[in-house]
Image (tube, rainbow, N blue to C red):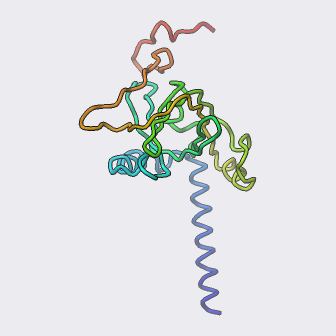
Amino acid sequence: MRKLNIAAIGLAGGTGLVAGLVWAFRRNPRLGSSFVNSVVNPALIGHGLVGRGRAEIATLEHLGRRSGVRRLTPVYPQPTPDGFRIIVPLGGHSEWARNVIAAGHCRLQLHDVVHELDEPSMVQPSALEGLPMVLRRVEEYLGFQYITLHRFSNAPGCLEPVDGVEPPLPVADASLMTPTEGEAQPASAVTSR
């Protein structure tokens, strides 16, 4: 009986911890993202743990919408009939998802195959088929979204430099890049209201 009481106290404490983490995440979705972006993601990519072989985590290549700099981000893609859907835990706060939507295209390396993707669209979990109802509700509550991407080509390959030779980069559409403070807007980006 004593072991059962200790287990119940431990479960209650664990539930409190989970509730606290959910509360903190809902207040600040970017909580912990700087650690993930500066430590976890580079370690996964640097050690070749994503996008290669039988890894379920892929490498997403995208261009910074302000800087135009090539970025690599580990993601968990789920195949769809015409491409992929990728969960975006930060929803509209996700920098990589905003970069992909701004550029209108990206590349994804999964199982040593590079997929060329376009037509990005952010969707709510409730709009997707094939997700269990409980999962949809939890993801909606936490503010998660998905980005859907259309695959227009794929070929065996790698996004990482091989023997010091960088793979070709996607071309940034300057009209879609958001200028940073102090930068002049390109003429093509100026719109009338």
Quadrant of image for the C terminus: top right
Residue 162 vertical position relative to residue 192 in the rendered view, above or below? below
Instruction: Looking at this view, name the residue that lies furthest to the right.
Output: 133
The answer to whether 149 appears left or right of 58 in the picture is: right
Give the left or right position of residue 121, taking residue 163 as reference: right
Relative height, residue 189 to residue 115 (above, below): above
- Which of the 4 image quarters holds residue 124? top right
Identify the residue at image location x=73%, y=56%: 134
The answer to whether residue 156 is seen in the rendering is yes
In the image, residue 147 lies at what x, y percent?
A: 60, 37
Q: Where is residue 121 drawn, in percent x and y?
A: 62, 31
Name the residue furthest left.
164
Question: Vertical placement of 109 versus 47: above or below?
Answer: above
Residue 152 sits in quarter: top right
Which residue of the protein is positioned furthest toward the front in this rendering? 156
Residue 72, percent across and down?
41, 38
Q: Nearer the viewer, residue 130 or 141?
A: 130
* Count of numbered circles in the view: 0
Closer to us: 52 or 172: 52
Which residue is depicted at the point 38% across and 36% down? 159
